[in-house]
Structure formats: structure tokens, C-alpha cells
Image (cartoon, helix red, strand yellow):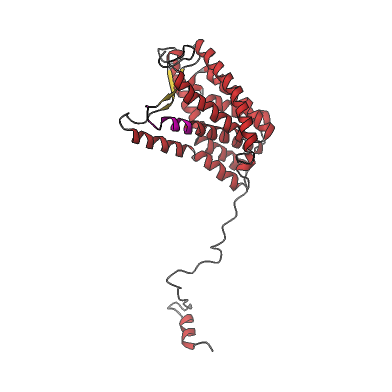
Amino acid sequence: MPDPASSDARERPSADGFPETPLRAGRAPRPESADRLPAAAPLTHRGLAGEVLLVLSLSLAASAVAAVISFVGSLTAPESLSEQTAGLVGSQAAAERPWLDLARQIASLVFAMAPVALVVYLLHRSRESARTIGFDLARPGRDLLGGAVLAAVIGGGGLAVYLVSHQLGLSVTVAPSALNEHWWSVPVLLLQAVKNGVLEEVVVVGYLLLRLEQLGWSPLRAIAAGSLLRAVYHLYQGVGMFVGNLIMGLVFCWFYRRYGRVMPLVVAHSVIDIVAFVGSAALIGHVGWLPGADG
């Protein structure tokens, strides 16, 4: 038999005439739907276009705007393009404060990956995943081999374009590394190279081509848009490197459309930048055929 006193306590009317229900352990009662999240709204054409603009604005479209402004500044400078220098990786603190410099380098690397994390999150929101664009470790051997071949072809061609365009006065002198010499300089350069490979290939190739296709763009139009964006955010290096990166974009987009995987592109881009950052930095000033800040 239930205790009448306890029953009365559970159903004792309040001042407004409604029964009172005691709180459990001081916690407010939860509504029945509290454990059920609302279903995600279906993607619309306008919503998808807005998503693409947002991702690009937070990443490489912003870099493209900055590159155009920098290029206009170079064109209006009294020196010719080949007499100007563009640094790729620079120190962020005085040489006598290496730990401050390192902390800033690491912070910039970490937050530069935020657009990639956002892309992966948005893919999951639309019931896709990083695997949809081939950004995974499912085929490490083939990805490494394909990336190495692409790096050799594109890297060699890019170096030729840079040397010729520099001789013609169409490109600035590129200084791959302006880091002060510290024990961590090479590891930071390696991380910068991998960051560039992941950020650019995931956003500008894998994500952008996928979303543009979902928006109804033809493959050729999407490839042209992605390649042009890549070329524009390298425009600060001059006309020659604009053309070189446009060609690189076309090749990379074709490769992605052909094989459906972005990981070989990440490998190729990372290897190219590792050679540029570490190899070229060691050669500049020591060989006559490679332009550099020292001559």
C-alpha cells in the first residue's frame, strides 16, 4: 500500500491550484524531447553556395585577395618584379627570442588547419566524410607513389617556369625561408610544407570540386574555377608563377577527377614545398643559376 502522506506530498496543490511535483536532487524536470536533437535541415542550392563562399572566405579566397593587393603593390613599386623579393616562411620574433618565435610558428600552423577541420565537419553534416574526397589512409602505397610522380613532374616544371619567368622579369625573387637559424627551423619548414599541401588540396581540389559539382557546375567549369583560384593566391609571386600554378591546378584537378583521391595531391604538394623550403634554402646564394636574396 502506498503511503498516503507521500502521495499527498507528490500531489499537493500549489497556490495556483496545480499539483506540485518535487524536484529530484535539485534538478529541474527535463522535457521529453531533450535527448533528441533536431534533424539537420536538407541542403539547398542557396545554402550550399553560401557554405562554399564561407569556407573560401575563411581560407584561400582571403589569400587570393591579399595576393592581388600585393601584386598591385609590386607593379607600382619603383623596382622591377625580378628585383623584389617575396618571402614564403619568415621569423615571427627576434633571433634572440627563439621560444617566442617557435610558439608563434606552432600557433599559426595549428590555426591554419581550421578550414580543413571545418571542411571535414561540413562533409559529415551532409552525410559524407573525408573519405568522400579521398582524404584518408586507405591506400598509402599508391598515394605515396602517385604523389611522388606528380611531385617530380610538377616540381620540375614549376622550377623551369620560375627560372624562365624570373629571367624575363615576370616574377619576383622567391625566398623560400627567412627563418632565423634555430634547432627547430627545419622541422617548422617541414610542417609548413605539409600544412600547405593539406590545406590547399583538401579545400581547393577535393572540397571545392565536390561542392561545385553538387551545385550543378560542369566538370570543366569547376576545374577552371579551382585552378584559377590557385593561380590567383600565388599571384604575389608574379605573372610567371601565376601561370605555373594555373597549370599545376589543371593537372591536379584532372588527377582528382580521374582517380577520386586527394591524398596523392597532398603528398605531391608537400614534397614540392619541402624541396622548395629546405632544399632551395640551402642552395640559394651557393649556386649561380638559382635566384635568391643574396644574388
Residue 285 appears left or right of 255: left
Q: Nearer the viewer, residue 239 or 150?
A: 150
Q: Nearer the viewer, residue 1 or 146?
A: 146
Q: Residue at x 68, y 33 (%)?
A: 259
Residue 10 in sight in this render: yes
Splitting the image into 4 quarters, where does residue 161 fall? top right
Q: Quadrant of the C terminus?
A: top left
Residue 50 x, y percent position in the rendering = 56, 39
Q: Residue at x 59, y 43 (%)?
A: 47
Splitting the image into 4 quarters, where does residue 155 fall? top right
Q: Nearer the viewer, residue 165 or 101?
A: 101
Residue 16 x, y percent position in the rendering = 44, 77
Q: Residue at x 50, y 10 (%)?
A: 167
Q: Nearer the viewer, residue 46 or 29?
A: 29
Residues in magenta, as a range: 180-191
Q: 153 above or below 99?
A: above
Residue 169 x, y percent position in the rendering = 49, 11
Q: Quadrant of the N terminus?
A: bottom right
Q: How many marks?
A: 0
Tell whether position 3 is magenta. no
Q: 43 above or below 95?
A: below
